[in-house]
Structures are given as structure tokens and as C-alpha cells.
Amino acid sequence: MLNKDTFKDLFNALYPRLISYSFKYVKDKFAAEEIVEDCLVILWEKREELAHIDDIKPYLYTMIRNASFKYLEKSKKVISLKKKHHDSAIAIEQDIIEEEVHAIILYKALETLPEKCRKVFELSCLKGVKYKDIATDLDISINTVKSQRSRAIELLKKQLKNNPFLMFLLSSL
């Protein structure tokens, strides 16, 4: 069963990637965020019913895709036949693989950052730790946290400029 800590880890690991996945369909950052948040709330509320699911990630991606389609239908936006056909299990697996590849590329780029920069980026952007807590943990000022985070994002943007997905992800931070 999905407990509070597992859900928090799932949220921290997948939230930005799920937003970008939804964004591929809805082309609206705020709508994508709302869709993902709604799906995560539903997942949490139905966690006991979903205890039989071995791998929650494909289930969650399917939820996001379906909710994105629903959003498009409600907002009277046209869904192409290609996107409707995208409904197969194979397509979901391909989407998950694509997201995983992007994560690997991002983590490889992170390894090239200066240590303090990387640590601040990981804590702030990937784990969602507040600036104040990062400053305390690393024994640096909040302004240093902010500048190191900004520096990390700029360095990553330079490295990943040819990857539109990751550029979008970095721009949304």
C-alpha cells in the first residue's frame, strides 16, 4: 500500500516529469500542473484500492494522459487521431522510457556541475527542500542558496540547450 513517505518520494521524483508529460498534450503549463496535482490527489485518495498494483508509474502516466485528454475535450480543443491512437500500452511504455532517458541526461549533466551548485540544485529543485533548510543544512546564507540554484539552472541550460524537453523543465523551475 502507498504510505505517506512512499507517496512523498513518488511526488518528489516524478512531479516535474509528470507536468512535462501532461504539457506535451495540453500545451498549457498551468493546466498541466493542475492536471498532475488532481491526479496525485486521486492517487492518494484511492491508495488502498490500488494496493494490488505492482508498478504505480505506468498507472500514473496513464492517469495523466487520460486527464490531459479530458481537459482538451472539456476546453473544446481538437485532439488529433494520432493522439487518440496514443492510447495503447506500448505508447505508455514508450513515454515512460522517454521520460527516463530525459532523467538520465539531466542527472549526467548534474554530475558536471560544481559540487555546491549541484547539491543546492538537487535539494531545492529535485527534493523540494526550502531555501532556509538548505541554508541551515549546508551552513550557507539563503542568498547563497538562491545564487547557487540560479547558477546551476543557467549552467544546465547551456549544457542542455539542444534538448527541448529538459529546457522546458528547467524553465519551469
Image (tube, rainbow, N blue to C red):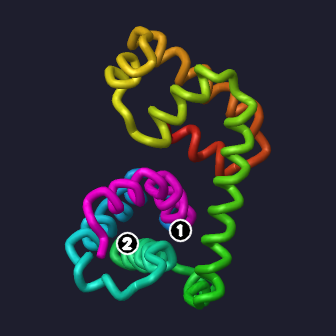
Residue 22 is covered by the magenta coloring? yes
The front one of 24 and 94 is: 94
Q: Are marks 2 and 1 in contact (CB under 8 Å)?
A: yes
Q: Position of residue 10 (x, y in %)?
A: 41, 60
Q: What mark, if any, has residue 25 been given in the picture?
A: 1
From this view, report whether residue 156 is shown above or below residue 7.
above
* Residue found at x 58% / y 89%: 89
Task: Using a 10 Å C-alpha cutoff, classify the residue at mark 2 as few (fewer than 14 neighbours), some (14 to 19) or many (20 or more).
Answer: some
**Image side of residue 131 versus residue 123, left or right:** left
* Residue found at x 53% / y 35%: 122
Residue type pointed to by label 2 = Tyr
Secondary structure mostly taken by the magenta-highlighted segment of the chain: helix
Q: For residue 142, say whether it is visible.
A: yes
Q: Position of residue 86 (x, y in %)?
A: 60, 84
| Residue at numbered disc 2 | 71
From this view, report whether residue 163 is shown above or below residue 55.
above
Q: For residue 78, say whether it is visible.
A: no
Task: Using a 10 Å C-alpha cutoff, classify the residue at mark 1 as few (fewer than 14 neighbours), some (14 to 19) or many (20 or more).
Answer: some
Q: Position of residue 123 (x, y in %)?
A: 47, 34
Q: What mark, if any, has residue 124 been given in the picture?
A: none
Q: Secondary structure at mark 1?
A: helix
Q: Secondary structure at mark 2?
A: helix
Question: Tag count in the figure?
Answer: 2
Residue type pointed to by label 1 = Tyr
Residue 15 is covered by the magenta coloring? yes
**Image side of residue 95 versus residue 131, left or right:** right
C-alpha separation, residue under disc 2 versus residue under disc 1: 9 Å
* Residue found at x 26% / y 72%: 42
The front one of 120 and 42 is: 120
- The range drawn in magenta is 1-24
